Amino acid sequence: MSLPILLVIINEYVNLFYGFQRLNNWKKFTVAETARTNYLGVLFMCLRSLVSFLSICLAASSVHEASKNAKNVQKEMLEKVIDSGNHTYCNQLQLFLTYNSPVIKLSAWGLIWFTKGIILTSLGSILAYSLLVIQILE
C-alpha cells in the first residue's frame, strides 16, 4: 500500500490511545451535560477508530490469504501440466513465471505488513502503552 494508509493507521492508533486515556477518567466525570457529551464523543471516536482499524487490517489480511491460496492453486496447476505431457512450452513457461512471482502482501508504506496476527499485536501494544502512561501520570 502507500503512505496514506500508513497515515490512516497512525491516526487510528492515536485515536485509540487518546480514547483509552480519556476514558480512564470516567469516575471523575460529573453529571454536567458538557462532561456527558465529551464522554460520548470520546467513546464514539474510540469505537470508530477501532472499527476502521479492524476493517483495514482484515481487508488487507484477506488479500494476503487469497494470494497465498492462488499461489497454491498455481503450483498444483503447474504440476498437473508438467505431469500430463499435453502442453505447449508457452503455457508451461507462463505458469512457471506466475508461480515464481511473490505472494501479494499489503503494507503501510513498507513499515507494517498486514496479516491477521497484527490485529492482536497492535491492540495489545496500544493497551500496554496506555496503561503504562496512566500509571506514570498517577
Image: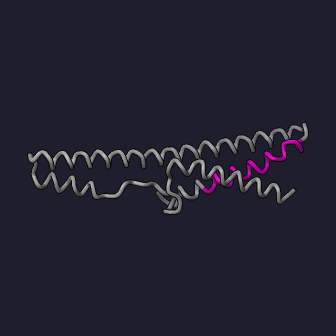
| Quarter of the view holding residue 39 | top right
Rendered residue at 83%/60% (across/down): 136
- Majority secondary structure of magenta residues: helix
Residue 22 locus on image (x, y percent)? 79, 49
Percent x, y of residue 103: 37, 54
> Among all residues in the image, which is located at the extreme front?
83
Colour mapping: one colour
The region drawn magenta spans: 10-29
What is the x, y in percent for residue 24?
A: 81, 47
Magenta run includes residue 66: no
Give whichever of 58, 38 is nearer the camera.
Answer: 58
| Residue closer to the observer: 40 or 24 | 24
**On the rendered structure, is 73 left or right of 136?**
left
Name the quarter where the C terminus is drawn.
bottom right
Tell how many labels: 0
- On the picture, is 23 further left or further right than 57? right
Residue 106: image x %, image y %? 45, 54
Q: Residue at x 26, y 49 (%)?
A: 75
Residue 55 appears left or right of 11: left
Q: Which residue is drawn at 37% across and 48% down?
A: 67
Residue drawn at point x = 89 percent, y = 44 percent = 28
Q: Does the magenta stretch include residue 21?
A: yes
Q: In this view, does 59 lie to the left or right of 126?
A: left
Furthest residue to the bottom? 110
